[in-house]
Image (spheres, grey):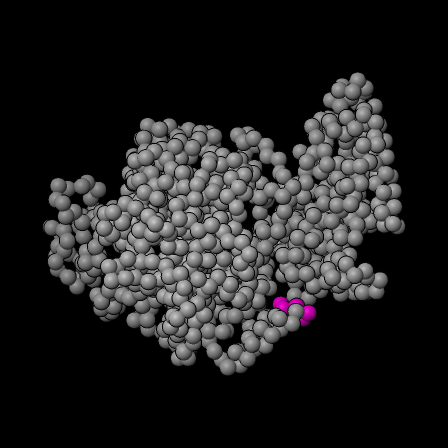
Amino acid sequence: MSNPQQPRDDAAADDREENPLVDALLAEILGKSTPPDLSSEIMRQWREASVVVRASQSPASQSPASQSPGSLIPASPSTSDDVPVIGRRTPAKASTSVRSTDSGWALVLLTLAASLILGVVGWEFVGPEELGFRRITKSSKSENSSLEVAPVRPTPQPSEQVMPPVTKAPDALPIPRKPPRNMTLAEGTPQPRSGDDVELSVPSLRERAERKSETVQWVSLRAAQGLEDYWDAVGAEPSPVASAEVIRDRIQQRVGVELDVAQLSDTLASGSASDKAAFAAELQQSIQKETNAKLAAAAWLNELTAAASGKLAVPQRDALIDELAGAFRGEKAFDAVLASWIGGGKDSSSDASSAWYTAMSDAGEFSLVHGLASLTMNVDLRCTRCHDSLIDSAGLQNDYWSLAAMLRRDLSKDHAGFWSVRESSDDASPVFYERLDGRQTMAEAGVPQHWLDDEATVRDPIRVQDVHTWSESLVDSRPLARGVVNAMWRWVHDRPLRGDLADARSAPLDDSLLQLEELLADDLLASNFDVGRLLAIVLSSPATMRSIPESLTRQDAWAVDAKKVSRDHQSVQAFAAAAPSPRMLSIAKRLEVTQRSIGASLRGVGGSDSVLAQPLAEASSEKPDNANFVAPLVNGFPDHVDALPVQWLASVGSLSSQVKHLGYLAGREGLPREIEPIATAMREAGVPLDLTLHRVWWLLQR
Amino acid sequence: MSDDIPPQDEALNSSECEASSDAGLDPQQLEARDLGPAALVARHQRGVWRYLRVLGCDPPTADDLTQETFLRVLSRDNFVQHNDKATAGYLRRTAFNLMISRHRRLGRVHPSSDSAVLDEVWDRWAGKDGSGDDAVDALRDCLQLLTDRARQALKLRFADDKSRVEIGDALGISDHGARNLMQRAKQQLRDCVADKLRTKENA
């Protein structure tokens, strides 16, 4: 592709000096260097800017490598003991960032002003972002006054040496696409309606079949480079590459798929980027095998349903696994499968739909609402059940209850436990929820438009008002693609790629992380929701290959510099190092370990060290014959911390409330009854508050 | 060139758009006022991108700076859309300053022609909507008027990225001959495009 200002010889440079306009347009006409459509990328970044702004306003973002990712500026004491209050924007900014010519915004602004006068806490965070005019501030780390949000090239080339050149089409999406495999919609998948007043952009099957996706090697390579860029950006130091055996075991434990160690060793030993990219293709082929696809489907279903799929009757579980395995094999589009499950399905698919709702609702309504929203629209509702999100102000309590009301109204469960989606629910009772100030508010059943549409603003009226329409809107949906990307990343790496700002374990937020998320979402859309392909790309990422830093193993606990431990923790948070293997410890075992750490229990889970506060077995790396060996079981038990799990906990009034909020963060509707007493016991035993809360967080992990 | 560069924030702090007058606007321009953010981007992104290419940015840099330009302008509290022309000018100025800032950061010397002249010429070529689509269409037509050899030389240069020597070899002429051939061809194209745009404007 010709570049008018990068001449290949002096004469050409002379030419261009005289005719830069002609040169530029000739390059466009003859060199096919046409203007790309950057609209979606610009609009996405404009929206994301508000998130980055909040991060940049927090101490954590000023030094990503030094503080917890969810750190935010504590502000004045909350009016409610249970509600964390974070640094807030001043009302004046809301008025300055709204264009005076827009009367609609002015009306909203008046509402804002009125609510501020009334001093309603939950409204204090409603600012220009919600009105569609998000502020972009200067980055503390950027040069000059350039924006915090770095632009993304639509078709960056990761390596000139190994990848073929890409020619951009005039209206090309960020990833060039090739014809995908033939795919069919799952049986019973609702077809897109026409003529509805719901403005949903659902492509036809023909349009989807004409799509082109890039090779899995190409995307894998770009994803790897994106992750390494992210590590550079946040200052995370990647740990050494783990051995092939360790990686194989890790993948098998997480995903259920067993890899060939020899092949893995060859890939790890090769310094060639193309070899590593080829590994992704081999992984995809492996996942597509019948047995592996079923194993992966069973494991992912278990993850998506928080292990509730294991409680299903075998035929029910098999119905779900069979359809999901088809998506891993590339025979079905996952979005269509999921839409079928959510929409109620037809005939035989209705069994799978019932099984899906049975598993998703196993832990209660909150689990159902939160789980569905997270997967299908990539929104985090952990805070908004009780109050508007005070950290990411996009989350409104009303939004949560709108979705909950729609599900309550449209889903029914008969006496036999069979779930179905009602065709008509006009006689449903209204759903009320309680605001922080005690007011009862009726929720309008439906899905907030801004969860479904990149272009929508927070204040758009609800246009999807029933489960059937909602399920249809998920087909080929970008929010669904993002949700699937994060769900799959969480499955493999224990945390979503882009976590919520409020989350204790979220990776530090940076533009490069958002770009990586978009890259994977784009590819998922381009491949017609081929989740097997996505899994191969995620598994082949450099994050999967990392070893656990030595400082984080119990063997070195007393010999390692605390700063080194802190740095390694930060690497773990940024996916640049593996975390100590999460053992499947029961809550009882974890409570026992915690009690022992403060001498509250003399009944150890081990043997010889059972009368000691600290387990002796940590000092040995040899695994004894005793099946109750202690050391590996307590991997990850916090003993060195230098900050709260999330900084906003500092603004929550009491220990009890802080513990409850950690429970909400862990996705639990309620706390196990032993948690609060053990937290109190730790404090009474002199354990610092930050360490106490870290240990509570460890206890609450599923 | 660098002496002509205004401080980066000059355009950002100026009120070029606000100073514009509504006088003389045609209905289409009036309708273009107060575009929403998405519509604003859709309407002006091609013009900004092409302008950056004219200024000498390679395509990836033009991609980056186009995005940065819109993000910068959308974040402005006091940005007012008076008309397409004013908005396009404001966007171009912002893009230009961001490009200069980028060059300074990277320690590069900007080799382009005088920016004021370029801006003026581009403003004419960009057309009423500021996209430059008319100029591209005109240039495509004008290319057909060239001789086969001239068209071949330009194709080798812009489509195949050949050097002057390689072009000369392909056409059986010296490298100087290739240079002169392309210079003449481009001058003809420039005149032809200018004529076509003038004709269209007067029609």
On the rendered structure, is A663 left or right of B105?
left
Q: Please report the residue visible at 30 percent of the width from the left and 40 percent of the height from the top.
A: A295
| Position of B59 relative to A161 (above/below) | below
The residue closer to the viewer here, A342 or B53, is A342
The residue closer to the viewer here, A97 or A150, is A97
Q: Is residue A22 magenta?
A: no
Percent x, y of residue A281: 42, 32
Q: Is residue A493 visible?
A: no
Quarter of the image that includes the C terminus of chain A: bottom left
- The residue furthest bottom is A118
| Position of A426 relative to A247 (above/below) | below
Quarter of the image that includes the N terminus of chain A: top right
The residue closer to the viewer here, A40 or A86, is A40
Q: Please report the residue visible at 55 percent of the width from the left and 63 percent of the height from the top.
A: A457
- The residue furthest top is B172
* Numbered-mark total: 0
Provide the major secondary structure of the magenta segment. loop
Q: Please report the residue visible at 46 percent of the width from the left and 76 percent of the height from the top.
A: A121
Percent x, y of residue A511: 52, 51
Q: Please report the residue visible at 81 percent of the width from the left and 25 percent of the height from the top.
A: B148
On the rendered structure, is A652 left or right of B14?
left
Report which quarter residue A185 is drawn in. top left
| Position of A427 relative to A514 (above/below) | below
Percent x, y of residue A334: 41, 45
> Which region of the structure is painted magenta?
A97-101
On the rendered structure, is A236 left or right of A299?
right
Q: Is residue A449 visible?
A: yes
Percent x, y of residue B120: 82, 50
